[in-house]
Amino acid sequence: MTWQPPTEPNGIITTFRLCWSLSAEHEVTCAPLNGGASRYQIRSLIAFSEYDVSLAARISIGLGPIFTRVYKTAEGVPSKPQDSRAWNTSATSIFITWRKPASINGILKGYQVFSRPTEDTGEPSPKDAGLRTNLTLSGLEPYKHYDVAVQALTGAGGGEISRVMVMTDETGEPHGRGDFLSFFLGLGGIIVRVCLKQFSVTTN
């Protein structure tokens, strides 16, 4: 922020006292500045947050009137989506789900999801998930490891990426064969194959 000295300081300005705090909070940070200062950059603030800022000039007999104003910081990028999980729903499709980031740092505009075979080094094209927290990826190759990533978006851009690895099924059948339900579940960097025996319940 920048400022001009008082037009009537009524003495020699020895220092300026600049203070700031998050609005509605009591913890205040102050910086004493020399009397010739006319600008200061406040750092390490929280994105998309309101701050109360005050400035006063000091002469030999004390502080003068205090100038106060509320400022709002710009949007930042979000933290990574939480609890990303993925599993195959067929030999050519994967379902991924997640929860919203702990810190949005702005207005959430949506999510985008990336996927590519693990051995592929190319740049994957993003798929728009809107504001939903799940998406089905289709048209994939059977029985192949995939790196899947999801990213939240604000006006400042894409945030930190949450990654998960999952494997498509080995056949064209949606959930395995016979009396067993089989799928690959990705949790972080771990892939687990889950097999469940199907059964039916009859009632008289």
Image: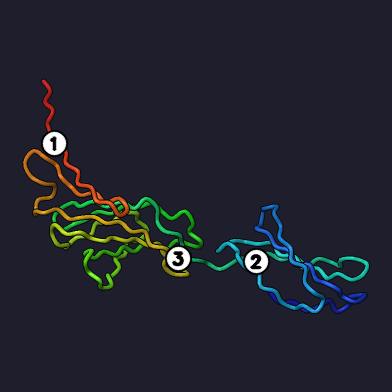
Q: Which residue is mark 1?
A: 197
Kind of residue at disc 1: Lys
* Residue nearest the observer in this picture, 24 or 88: 88
Instruction: In the rendered structure, find residue 71 and report the number of the disc placed on it.
Output: 2
Rate crowding at label 3 as few (under 14), some (14 to 19) or many (20 or more) other CA atoms within 10 Å. Answer: some
Kind of residue at disc 2: Tyr
Q: Please state which of the two labelled residues, at mark 1 or mark 2, is closer to the viewer.
A: 1
Instruction: In the rendered structure, find residue 154 and report the number of the disc placed on it.
Output: 3
Give the mark nearer the N terminus: 1 vs 2. 2
- Vertical relation: 18 (above or below) 166: below
Residue at disc 3, secondary structure: strand
- Residue appearing at x 65%, y 66% in the figure: 71
18 lies left or right of 127: right
- Vertical relation: 10 (above or below) 198: below
Q: Quarter of the image containing the C terminus?
A: top left
- Residue appearing at x 19%, y 60% in the figure: 138
Rate crowding at label 2 as few (under 14), some (14 to 19) or many (20 or more) other CA atoms within 10 Å. Answer: some
Residue at disc 1, secondary structure: strand
Residue at disc 2, secondary structure: strand
Residue 70 drawn at (x, y percent)? 68, 64
58 lies left or right of 46: right
- Asked where in the image residue 151 lies, by quadrant, the reply is bottom left
- Disc count in the image? 3
